[in-house]
Image (spheres, helix red, strand yellow):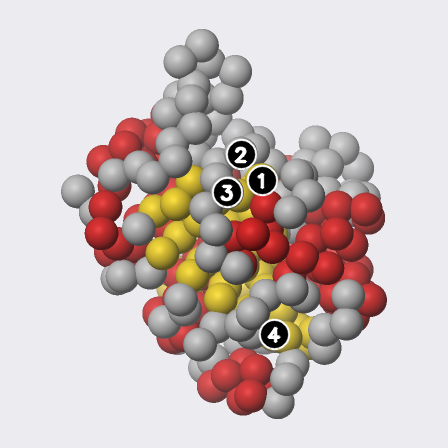
Amino acid sequence: VVQLIKLGGSVLTDKDGPASVRNDVLDRLAREIATSPEPVVVVHGAGSFGHPLARQAKLAAGLVGPKSAQAAATVHASVRRLNLQVLDALRRAGLSPVTFSPLGSFLCSDGLPGHWNLIPLHRGIELGLTPVTHGDLVLDTARGLTVLSGDQIMIEMARFFSPTRVVFVIDQDGVLSAPPGHAEAELLVEPTLLEVERAQAFSDGTENDATGGMANKLAAARAMVKRGVEVDFVNGLIAGRVSEALSGATTGTRLTPEART
Ligand code: IPE
């Protein structure tokens, strides 16, 4: 039995600024993950280590110009730098994290992830390792390259691991009923899938993001709930929320398979 956690890039980094990690947040999240009663698979986003450059070079569309390959290599190196910092924080927290790189494992077709052999991750968990992976550039049969978000990776992971719980760590208290800052925006605590669909519609295209932002996350969450997995959205900027979610408490938005309609 495992739990899957996605550390959003907007929590780990300041998404609008230059590539730098919020070290105190990362260290605290690592310690909270280490309290999980079950093994955890960690997926992290790219934040300011990936999105600004990926957008600028239009990498989600593929190899579109003579400089795309170089831009792709630059983004990949940058995401790997963030990944190393995540590994260091998890090790400081007492875990034994190892990275499974999406670029070396996934072949997408027109943006859709193909098969990824996750048996090595499973074996790693049995040995006491904590598998870590991240949003990344990946090879694509139609586009040459594309940007694969950590949220899409979560869907693949959930399919393979049938986790007891999936936790999306974000920079707000959970899923809101209207855009943040809107007068009617309130936290959806245990929304129906219809309410989540509405939240997804207003999230579309509202963020500075190469992979679809909150809308993408909500689409991923709906896909998982439909297959019977419980999905939590919690605020990673507030101490204790992640450890509480991993121990089963509701601390933000919880999508349950029972509340499907
Ligand atoms: C994006 O991954 C990967 C790149 C931009 C290379 P995510 O979509 O999972 O990242 P965050 O969580 O939104 O930052």
Identify the residue at horizontal 46%, vertical 13% (top origin).
Answer: 182
User: In front: mark 4 or mark 3?
Assistant: 3
Q: Distance between the Cα atoms at labels 4 and 2?
A: 26 Å
Read off the residue under disc 2. Answer: 173
Is mark 4 in CB contact (under 8 Å) with mark 3? Answer: no
Is mark 4 in CB contact (under 8 Å) with mark 2? Answer: no
Q: Is residue 59 visible?
A: no
Read off the residue under disc 1. Answer: 235
- Quadrant where the C terminus lies? top left
User: How many residues crowd around disc 4 within 10 Å: few (fewer than 14), some, or many (20 or more)?
Assistant: many
Q: Is residue 135 above or below residue 260?
A: below
What amino acid type is highlighted by mark number 2? Asp
Read off the residue under disc 3. Answer: 251
Q: Distance between the Cα atoms at labels 1 and 2?
A: 5 Å
Look at the numbered disc 3 and give the secondary structure of its residue.
loop
Residue 208: numbered disc: none
Is mark 1 in CB contact (under 8 Å) with mark 2? Answer: yes
User: How far from the left and from the top, in percent, is residue 251?
Assistant: 50, 42
User: In front: mark 4 or mark 1?
Assistant: 1
Look at the numbered disc 2 and give the secondary structure of its residue.
loop
User: How many residues crowd around disc 1 within 10 Å: few (fewer than 14), some, or many (20 or more)?
Assistant: many
Q: Earlier in the sequence, mark 1 or mark 2?
A: 2
Q: Is residue 192 above or below residue 198?
A: below
- Quadrant where the N terminus lies? bottom left
User: In front: mark 3 or mark 2?
Assistant: 3
Q: Quadrant of residue 44?
A: bottom right
Q: Earlier in the sequence, mark 4 or mark 1?
A: 4
Read off the residue under disc 4. Answer: 131
User: How far from the left and from the top, in percent, is residue 94?
Assistant: 77, 72
User: How far from the left and from the top, in percent, is residue 102?
Assistant: 56, 69
Q: Earlier in the sequence, mark 4 or mark 2?
A: 4
